């Protein structure tokens, strides 16, 4: 499935802006760019199958070099840049469709595995340069992921290939990634602190400051739009004592990331984030002793808990600056447990359609709640179990299309899942693979040796990496409960 944000459009559609001349120039770059990718893919396969002298290999390599030269002649320069699931030729984004999908994604995964974000091609480019570059790209690498780009550059140098200038992905340049993580940690900590303040203020009958919460949500939205991985990683911390606050922040993070996938605008994401952050505000009106009770609930206690949606609406009416609060926050507080078939609570009197925001928050909420350890749930489900349950059990009342988008966001093995690999190592899922057909091959942090001894902080590996024969180096066998190994997943994300 392709998220609506990134529509698949055939190349023949006209360019959205610019003069007619610009548009035709644009489509020329796009056409030649696609031919370049095709021929590079063809050359990769030819190099793998036949000896170098083979005519098919020579022809494929000559084609690649010719397309490069054509682009350089037309554009004055040639840079191939990988960004998410896309390949750019200079400033032009190549369009993906079904017949080029395999070549695009194969090339993208090779570049990604090598740590390459962009390749500038010089005008002296020749077929033999591509031969060396593609062979090196396909060779299995035992180097640390962070070293691969430097090693590859060195190998090209020593082979006398100077036509390529390789650079790391823009957001992952050395130091930037660390900074992004630091920023994410700060955003997360501030959000939890502000939510704690808000909830206790409501509990004490005070009127919390909405402006401050708006800033919190803006921080989360901006962070998700710039670099979503770090913030999603932090949702795995799930501090037992702070459950109520971290839960609200986690639901906000998941909802915003999901809203982004569904193509919402930045302003809509702000509103959605506010609604998500406030979805359980009604719980501040329920005695803590009931919220934290570990045994079964009496009917009366259950009635109180089940009243948190409408208590939430009341609380939202009473906050200072309620006029600044999107009306949708109240709807979400009211609807987030209703379920699609309206069998949840509160039971509406009339038939109704749940709002899009409520459906999004319900999924983020259901996922975070089920994977967290709480008073009445000492053994949480693994994230993968929860995901399948939400997808396959209609009684959960989740919107199947949004669940699908959520799976695309988090992968089949969501971030924070402990997995056992076919190498007998344990791994913690670190980041989802952006390629749709690779959802079962995330980036994983190896946290044990092959004997099962837990290590810290462990090393990152990409499960999409293959050896020279195209066989995957590591594959997930099953998911496991981290408690069995004494592992605290959150420790690996701070
Ligand atoms: Fe709730
Ligand atoms: Fe909740």
Image (cartoon, helix red, strand yellow):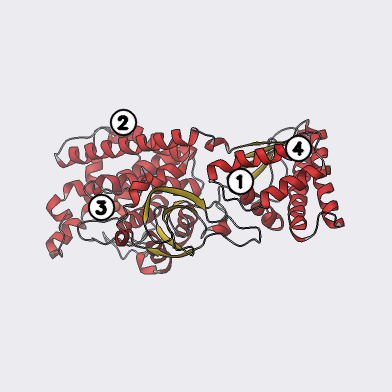
Can residue 273 be seen at all in this image of the molecule? yes
Which mark is drawn over residue 211? Answer: 2
- Residue under the point 85% across and 52% down: 59
**Which mark is first along the chain, 3 or 1?**
1
Residue 159 in picture, x, y percent from top left = 74, 40
Residue identifier under label 4: 160
Q: Nearer the viewer, mark 2 or mark 1?
A: 1
Q: Tell me, yes or no, whether the two marked residues, 2 and 1, touch with CB atoms within 8 Å.
A: no
Distance CA(mark 2)–CA(mark 3): 23 Å
Ligand 1 neighbours mark 3 (CB distance < 8 Å): yes
**Which mark is first along the chain, 4 or 3?**
4
Packing grade of label 4 (10 A; few <14, some 14-19, many >=20) is: few
Which mark is drawn over residue 114? Answer: 1
Distance CA(mark 2)–CA(mark 1): 45 Å
**Which mark is first along the chain, 2 or 4?**
4
Residue 490 in picture, x, y percent from top left = 33, 48
Task: Report the front residue among 320 and 241.
Answer: 241
- Residue under the point 16% across and 42% down: 203
Tell me if 460 is positioned left or right of 128 in this view. Answer: left
Residue identifier under label 3: 309
Q: Nearer the viewer, mark 1 or mark 4?
A: 4
- Quarter of the picture holding the C terminus: top left
Residue 410 in picture, x, y percent from top left = 45, 54
Q: Tell me, yes or no, whether the two marked residues, 3 and 4, touch with CB atoms within 8 Å.
A: no
- Residue under the point 25% across and 42% down: 316
Packing grade of label 2 (10 A; few <14, some 14-19, many >=20) is: few
Residue 135 in picture, x, y percent from top left = 72, 50
Say what secondary structure mark 1 lies in: loop
Mark count: 4
């Amino acid at each position: 499935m392709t998220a609506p944000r990134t529509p698949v459009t055939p190349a023949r559609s006209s360019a959205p802006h610019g003069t007619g001349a610009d548009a035709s120039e644009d489509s020329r770059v796009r056409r030649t760019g696609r031919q370049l990718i095709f021929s590079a893919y063809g050359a990769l396969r030819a190099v793998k199958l036949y000896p170098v002298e083979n005519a098919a290999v020579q022809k494929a390599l000559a084609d690649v070099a010719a397309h490069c030269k054509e682009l350089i002649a037309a554009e004055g320069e040639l840079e191939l840049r990988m960004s998410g699931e896309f390949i750019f030729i200079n400033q032009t984004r190549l369009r993906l469709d079904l017949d080029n999908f395999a070549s695009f994604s194969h090339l993208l995964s090779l570049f990604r595995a090598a740590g390459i974000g962009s390749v500038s091609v010089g005008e002296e480019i020749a077929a033999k340069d591509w031969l060396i570059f593609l062979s090196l790209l396909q060779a299995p690498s035992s180097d640390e992921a962070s070293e691969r780009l430097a090693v590859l550059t060195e190998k090209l140098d020593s082979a006398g290939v100077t036509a390529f200038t390789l650079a790391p992905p823009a957001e992952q340049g050395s130091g930037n990634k660390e900074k992004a993580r630091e920023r994410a940690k700060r955003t997360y900590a501030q959000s939890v602190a502000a939510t704690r303040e808000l909830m206790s203020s409501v509990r004490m009958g005070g009127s919390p400051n909405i402006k401050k919460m708006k800033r919190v949500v803006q921080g989360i939205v901006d962070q998700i739009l710039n670099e979503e991985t770090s913030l999603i990683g932090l949702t795995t911390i799930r501090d037992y004592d702070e459950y109520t606050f971290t839960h609200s922040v986690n639901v906000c993070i998941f909802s915003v990331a999901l809203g982004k996938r569904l193509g919402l605008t930045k302003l809509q994401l702000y509103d959605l984030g506010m609604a998500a952050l406030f979805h359980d505000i009604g719980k501040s009106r329920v005695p803590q002793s009931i919220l934290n009770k570990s045994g079964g609930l009496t009917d009366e206690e259950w009635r109180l808990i089940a009243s948190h949606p409408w208590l939430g609406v009341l609380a939202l009416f009473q906050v200072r600056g309620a006029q600044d609060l999107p009306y949708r926050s109240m709807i979400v507080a009211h609807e987030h447990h209703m379920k699609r078939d309206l069998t949840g609570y509160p039971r509406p009197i009339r038939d109704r359609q749940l709002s899009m925001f409520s459906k999004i928050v319900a999924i983020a909420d259901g996922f975070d709640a089920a994977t967290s350890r709480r008073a009445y749930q000492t053994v949480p489900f693994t994230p993968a179990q929860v995901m399948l349950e939400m997808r396959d059990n209609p009684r959960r009342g989740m919107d199947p299309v949004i669940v699908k988008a959520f799976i695309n966001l988090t992968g089949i093995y969501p971030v924070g899942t402990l997995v056992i690999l076919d190498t007998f190592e344990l791994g913690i899922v670190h980041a989802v693979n952006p390629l749709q057909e690779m959802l079962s091959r995330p980036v994983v942090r190896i946290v044990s040796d092959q004997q099962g001894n837990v290590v810290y902080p462990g090393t990152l590996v990409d499960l999409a990496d293959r050896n020279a024969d195209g066989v995957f180096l590591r594959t997930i066998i099953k998911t496991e409960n981290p408690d069995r190994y004494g592992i605290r997943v959150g420790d690996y994300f701070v």
